Image: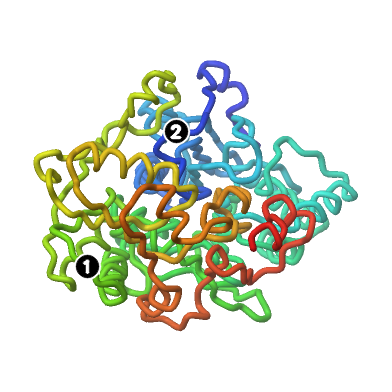
Amino acid sequence: MILHDSDLLADVPVVSSSEPLDQLDKMEEACGVFGLYAPGEDVATLTYFGLYALQHRGQESAGIATIDGETIHCYKHMGLVSQVFDEERLKTLPGQAAVGHTRYSTTGSSLVVNAQPAIVESRLGALALAHNGNLVNTVDLREHLQRQGCTFSTTTDSEMIALAIAQEVNQGKDWLNGALSAFIHCQGAYSLVIGTPEGIMGVRDPHGIRPLVIGILPGPTRRYVLASETCGLDIIGAEYLRSVEPGELVWISEEGMASFHWAQKPQRKLCVFEMIYFSRPDSIVNEETLYSYRLRLGQRLAQESQIEADMVIGVPDSGIPAAIGYAQTSGIQYAEGLIKNRYVGRTFIQPTQSMRESGIRMKLNPLKDVLQGKRIIMIDDSIVRGTTSRKIVKALRDAGATEIHMLISSPPVTHPCFYGLDTDTQDQLVAATHSVAEIKERIGVDSLVYLSWEGMLQSTGEAPEHFCSACFTGDYPIEIPEQIKRSKLILEDAVA
């Protein structure tokens, strides 16, 4: 039985999510997932706070489904977690387990119907599924499901995964075997949290491209938590246990947690952009915070480039750890030159044209007395289009900086992502069609230096083959069907 949100949507206005100015030069994460099995706890409120900690992974929509015996209670809508939910709404979501999701769309349009968790019915009851990633065989999978008699309520690949599981269950399998059979038909990147009347599952694809971790709530009995990042555990006081392994399914129920390694040849390929930018700096990967890794990126940048300057600044927030690392190694003073307005959030109100022309600064404002007359090294994590970088550089020059040297703590982004990041088509990626010297001129800096691909991967302390770096190299670990590839790639001779 489902108590769904369809009757509740009418009382919340749907907003249009046109692209904010400050996000033009960043790739955006697809989403964050969260789940827990905790009888006796207020699972809806715990999930709310878990999603709140994962808000950086998606600001388009949010949803929570709770499981109360045979009933799934679900509410989801467009907006930030704090906009979609309040105390009264959370009280309508009772249960012993929960699945939560916060979304930035990469497949499927920005419609409320595509908000997650995806809910589908089956022979054994309803299931709720939250998905981080992208499938690459959606055309074939949709045709397969249509032949099975499935109808679709959304335009997302997440619903397809849920329907594939329900179809296997409807053919006589239990939840566990139904899910394992369904994953045979799913190709691409997926970290999943799945809620059923009997328990919840956490799943990663055989390459583990998107992260998923396991935590334990304190108490006399073990109650388990699943989250995209460890910061989702910290906020509710859960202890980090380990990551879900590539090609692993964990089944959590009243009997505890069981693990099933279902992929024949799992091969870890964690998205390296999770390390560089997407995940929060306080989240743990490979037994250390990502702040420590990003600090090493800056240190490696200083080793690979020698620039005379008066101070080092970082573009808040993602460029700051690398800037500190650069300053430590180079001996050049670190200072705050750009102040971020952390209370802006994501706005759906677009500036007027006159505001754009006058150089509206919604999130970043330079410190004129700090920058006046100084030679500046500015460090950021990446350049995608170059539009925002150009605006920041102009603001620094207007504030009195005499030289601006831009250093990037990753290599040039030359290829689009097909595994769950919101990237432009390749012809919109500035490094795919322009040389470093040309990019330097476009954004208006005195020099531009990218970190080497080798330096980026060596700084992880892990074997380079453990990471997906296709956005820098075009070497995709999961084969991309031609009809999908053509949607984002441009002809090689156009790049040359």
Q: Residue at x 40, y 55 (%)?
A: 440
- Which mark is drawn over residue 325? 1
Task: Using residue 48 as the reference point, say whether residue 259 is left or right of it.
Answer: right
Q: Residue 485: name its quadrant.
A: bottom right
Q: How many marks?
A: 2
User: Can you give x and y, in whole percent of width and height, for residue 11 in the image?
Assistant: 52, 16
Position of the C terminus, as image quadrant, is: bottom right
In this view, which residue lies farthest toward the left?
Answer: 369
Kindly identify which residue carries mark 2. 20
* Placement of 246 over or under 17, stated as above or below: below
Image position, residue 136 (x, y; %): 70, 58
Q: Position of residue 50 (x, y in %)?
A: 38, 47
In terms of secondary structure, where does tag 2 sit? loop
Q: Is residue 480 above or below residue 424?
A: below
Confirm whether residue 385 shows in the render.
yes
Q: Element under label 1?
A: helix
Q: Which one is earlier in the sequence, the residue at label 1 or at label 2?
A: 2
Q: The residue under label 1 is which amino acid type?
A: Gly
Position of 378 with respect to 472 (left or right) is left
- At horizontal 57% and vertical 17% (from top left) the residue drawn is 10
**Could you tell whether 145 is left or right of 256 in the image?**
right
How crowded pointer 2 is (Cα within 10 Å; few <14, some 14-19, many 20+) is rated as some
Q: Amino acid at mark 2?
A: Pro
Picture quarter with the N terminus: top right
> Residue 218 at x, y = what percent?
29, 60
Q: What residue is drawn where x is 59% and y is 33%?
A: 110
